[in-house]
Amino acid sequence: MIFCKVCGEALNLFETRDEEICYACLRKDIKQARPAPVRETGAMDFLSEALLAHEEDKLVVRSPEGWILWSAPASETHNLGAILARAGRIHAIRKKRQK
């Protein structure tokens, strides 16, 4: 019988003879080695609180402060990437002016 060099438990049948550490210890090592996700603070953080609304036949993106960051006719199709980029740029400009 072969035992794990970390915890001392017997290696199970699925582990090969060349392995010296059991799967449970390997999983623990992987979880500890994996860094926790870091939330990056950036210019687009306001989007988690921004509102998208349909007002008077227009789509409108409003910041948490109430600023209109983007608007366009609701009858047209719009690229989400372009909307977010434009809203982010306008929000950055307004934040600068506010300071």
Image (cartoon, rainbow, N blue to C red):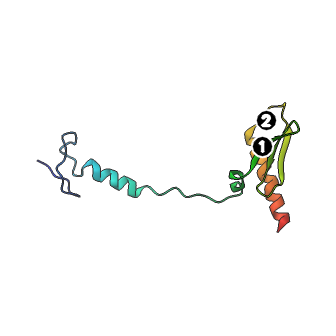
Q: Is residue 14 left or right of residue 39?
A: left
The percent position of residue 58, horizontal first and vertical second, equals 86, 38
In which quadrant of the rendered view does residue 97 lie? bottom right
Q: Which residue is mark 1?
A: 83
Secondary structure under tag 2 reads: loop
Picture quadrant where residue 92 is located: bottom right
Residue 48 x, y percent position in the rendering: 68, 51
Image coordinates of residue 11 in percent, x first then y, are: 19, 47
- Secondary structure at badge 1 equals helix
Q: Is residue 47 left or right of residue 3?
A: right
Identify the residue at image location x=20%, y=53%: 4
Q: In the figure, 95 relative to 90: above or below? A: below
Query: Which of the two labelled residues, at mark 1 and mark 2, occupies the earlier sequence position?
Result: 2
Coordinates of residue 1 in the picture (x, y in percent): 11, 47
Of 9 and 74, nearer the camera is: 74
* Rendered-image quadrant of the C terminus: bottom right
Q: Nearer the viewer, residue 77 or 19?
A: 77
Tell me the tag on residue 78.
2
Q: Residue at x 72, y 55 (%)?
A: 46
* Disc 1 to disc 2, C-alpha distance: 7 Å
Q: Residue at x 64, y 60 (%)?
A: 41
Residue placed farthest to the bottom in the image?
99
The amino acid on which the numbered mark 1 sits, given as a three-letter code, is Ile
Q: Which residue ends up furthest to the right in the rendered image?
A: 56
- Asked if the residue under mark 2 is in contact with the one under mark 1, i.e. CB atoms within 8 Å, the reply is yes
Query: At 16% from the left edge and 50% from the top edge, which residue is drawn?
Result: 10
Instruction: Name the foreground residue: 96 vs 58.
Output: 58
> Within 10 Å of the Cα at label 2, are there few (<14), some (14-19), or many (20+) other Cα atoms?
few
Q: Which mark is residue 38?
A: none
Q: Is residue 33 left or right of residue 78?
A: left
Give the amino acid at mark 2: His
